[in-house]
Image: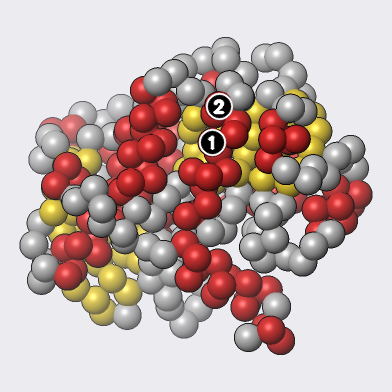
Amino acid sequence: MKSLKIGLVDLDTSHPGSFVPLIRGLGHEVTGVFDSGTVYPPGYAETFARDHQIDHACESLEELADRVDAVFIHSCNWDLHVRHAQPFVEAGKAVFIDKPLAGNVGDLQQMIGWAKQGAVVTGGSALRYCNEVKEWKERKIPAEEWVYGFVGCAVDEFNYGVHAYSMLQGLLGPGLESVRYLGENVQRQIELTWKDGRQGIVNIGKTAGYLPFYATLVTQKQVDHINVDNSRLYQALLESVLPYLAGEAPPPLSFEELAETEMAAIAAILSAQQGGKPIRLDEIPSDFIGYDGMAFSKYYKSLIFPENK
């Protein structure tokens, strides 16, 4: 694979710092960073760049776009993802958008449109590509043997909850058709149905303690339980997406398939509002806003800087 010059946009979460050594270990350079100040104060980009031996802390997205072949957008305010990706898409640079891709249908449709127009754009949760999911899929269990799946995680319903949706889609493949809110018992239970009739549940939301990413999978011949090894997540993700970003492989999933998980999470809200009515992904109103990225980023900042609450 050719060596890419990679940029990082927004340094809000632990992901940028965790990605840097892995990107380098896979033979690529991190050549610049930009931070919009959603979480950290002015000057943080310079500090991050110095601490991670990155040459340039850029003052604008356009300056960073001039320095890179590809960019990773890590904004914890997912409502910024389209705005921050656009200069790179327009410059013909490859784009990875961290999870959640977006919290509203309009932004997801914009990203799908970019991909259909030929932009190199991907993103999402590492749980779709994790080693445990890959190993289970390699067994090539026929769809007709499927009985049910139960996948879950803790922390919150979307920023973390999207991992559960993504893991279930990773296990069953794309083709989500509808979503039904089942109810809440500590966590929320959401049933997902595929176009071929297969079904599974995601269990999401805050718990008293941290839970691992997990899945229990029932087929006609056996029951499997998976606990994901978090220490290997980012390596597996980067190994899956970097060949595509380098122009040397097709996308791991089309963006339309990739966005099914965020669409499912948005549909779950609509289903809950309508008393558990099943909601088809293609029936979600284009102006429906499921999750507010600005509100989440303020909450996230309060966790980092509790004295500023």
> For this view, does 309 lie left or right of residue 26?
left
Residue drawn at (57%, 44%), measured in percent from left and top? 84
Residue drawn at (28%, 38%), measured in percent from left and top? 172
Res 296 seen here: yes
Numbered tag placed on residue 12 in the rendering = none
| Residue at numbered disc 1 | 86
> For this view, does 223 lie left or right of residue 112?
left
At label 1, which amino acid type do we have?
Answer: Gln
Residue drawn at (61%, 49%), measured in percent from left and top? 74
> For this view, does 43 lie left or right of residue 278?
right
| Residue at numbered disc 2 | 90
At label 2, which amino acid type do we have?
Answer: Glu
Front residue of 301/1: it is: 301
> For this view, does 27 lie left or right of residue 181?
right
Picture layout, residue 295 above or below residue 8: below
Residue 120 percent location from the top left of the image: 51, 24
Front residue of 305/168: it is: 305
Give the CA separation, mark 2 to mark 1: 6 Å
Picture layout, residue 122 above or below residue 128: above
Q: How crowded is mark 1: few (under 14 residues within 10 Å), some or many (20 or more)?
A: some
The C terminus is located in which quarter?
A: bottom right
Look at the numbered disc 1 and give the secondary structure of its residue.
helix
Residue 59 percent location from the top left of the image: 78, 46
Residue 194 percent location from the top left of the image: 17, 41
Image quadrant in which you'd find residue 157: bottom left
Total marks shown come to 2
Mark 2 touches mark 1? (CB < 8 Å)? yes
The N terminus is located in which quarter?
A: top right
Look at the numbered disc 2 and give the secondary structure of its residue.
helix
Q: How crowded is mark 2: few (under 14 residues within 10 Å), some or many (20 or more)?
A: few
Residue drawn at (73%, 43%), measured in percent from left and top? 60
